[in-house]
């Protein structure tokens, strides 16, 4: 098994006043040649957006975009006519495909929003753009990893145009979780949202991450009161 450790304090950082962003991978003006991507995972941004502010209408194409609100509410609008508000325990998934315009704004005029914005390279290019959002209850993720995004179309997951899987777990009590890779040749990027965990002897704190690959699975020793995101993606 190969691993790469990404410490939270070594992420890229940009403070634009209305937007306070941390970048796990090279993004905008932040460039680190050792952190361009992890397999087909291209972007993992940890954004705090000021009340009433946000990203105005802008284009995307041929990218799979997943947004996970951690606190606050986010308002989405796009050129397909979709309008929605997503909150914690909801997830947004968008296939930019052949091209679309969208905006994402903090829906609150008084409270900031903290969200994860994640981009994955698509499996098939120039598909018809697609937008979806879904609620996942806290109970779904308590004490286990719940798959929230997958390439299989099913009622209890959100579809992605790639052989990638996103799983979220919330752990009140400490535990050891066994994780099996979903596809041969995939790697996993483990990102600690809250709390802590240990993977392959590497201790992870809040917002630390570790990538693992060339393995069929691994163990995660999860600390009490932790929330963990696992992104299982093809490595090439």
Image (cartoon, helix red, strand yellow):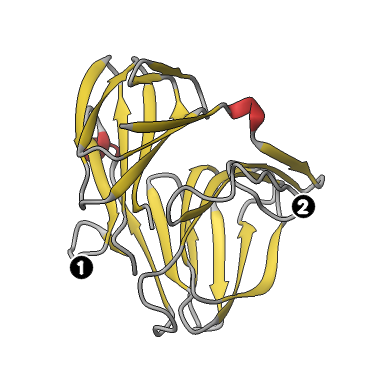
For image coordinates 54% across by 66% down, the residue present is 76
Mark 1 or 2: in front is 2
In the rendered image, which residue does mark 2 sit on? 29
Left or right: 57 as drawn, with respect to 206: right
Q: Percent from the top left, x then y, of residue 64?
A: 44, 66
- Mark 1 crowdedness (10 Å alpha carbons): few <14, some 14-19, many ≥20: few
Q: Residue furthest right?
A: 17
- Mark 2 crowdedness (10 Å alpha carbons): few <14, some 14-19, many ≥20: few
Residue 128: mark in rendering: none
Left or right: 159 as drawn, with respect to 59: left
For image coordinates 73% across by 47% down, the residue present is 30
- Along the line of sight, the residue nearer the viewer: 86 or 57: 57
Calculate the distance from the C-alpha at mark 1 to the C-alpha at mark 2. 36 Å
Residue 153: mark in rendering: 1
Question: Is label 2 in a helix, a strand or a loop?
Answer: loop
Residue 202 position (above or below residue 50): above
Q: Percent from the top left, x then y, of residue 80?
A: 49, 84
Q: Earlier in the sequence, mark 1 or mark 2?
A: 2
Residue 125 position (above or below residue 144): below
Q: Percent from the top left, x then y, of residue 166?
A: 33, 49
């Amino acid at each position: 098994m190969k691993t790469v450790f990404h410490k939270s304090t070594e992420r890229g950082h940009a403070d634009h006043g209305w937007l306070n962003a941390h970048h796990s991978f090279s993004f905008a003006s932040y460039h680190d040649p050792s952190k361009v991507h992890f397999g087909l995972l291209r972007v993992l941004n940890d954004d705090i957006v000021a009340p009433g502010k946000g990203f105005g209408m802008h284009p995307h194409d041929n990218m799979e975009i997943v947004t996970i609100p951690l606190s606050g509410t986010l308002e989405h609008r796009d050129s397909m006519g979709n309008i929605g508000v997503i909150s914690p325990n909801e997830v947004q998934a968008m296939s930019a495909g052949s091209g679309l315009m969208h905006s994402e704004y903090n829906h609150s005029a008084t409270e900031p929003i903290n969200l994860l914005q994640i981009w994955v390279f698509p499996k098939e290019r120039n598909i018809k753009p697609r937008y979806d959002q879904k609620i996942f209850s806290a109970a779904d993720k308590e004490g286990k990893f719940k798959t929230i995004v997958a390439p299989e179309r099913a009622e209890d997951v959100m579809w992605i145009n790639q052989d990638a899987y996103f799983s979220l777990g919330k752990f009140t009590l400490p535990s050891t979780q066994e994780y099996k890779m979903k596809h041969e040749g995939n790697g996993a990027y483990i990102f600690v949202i809250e709390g802590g965990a240990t993977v392959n002897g590497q201790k992870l704190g809040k917002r630390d991450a570790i990538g693992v690959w060339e393995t069929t699975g691994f163990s995660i020793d999860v600390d009490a009161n932790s929330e963990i995101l696992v992104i299982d993606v093809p490595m090439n």
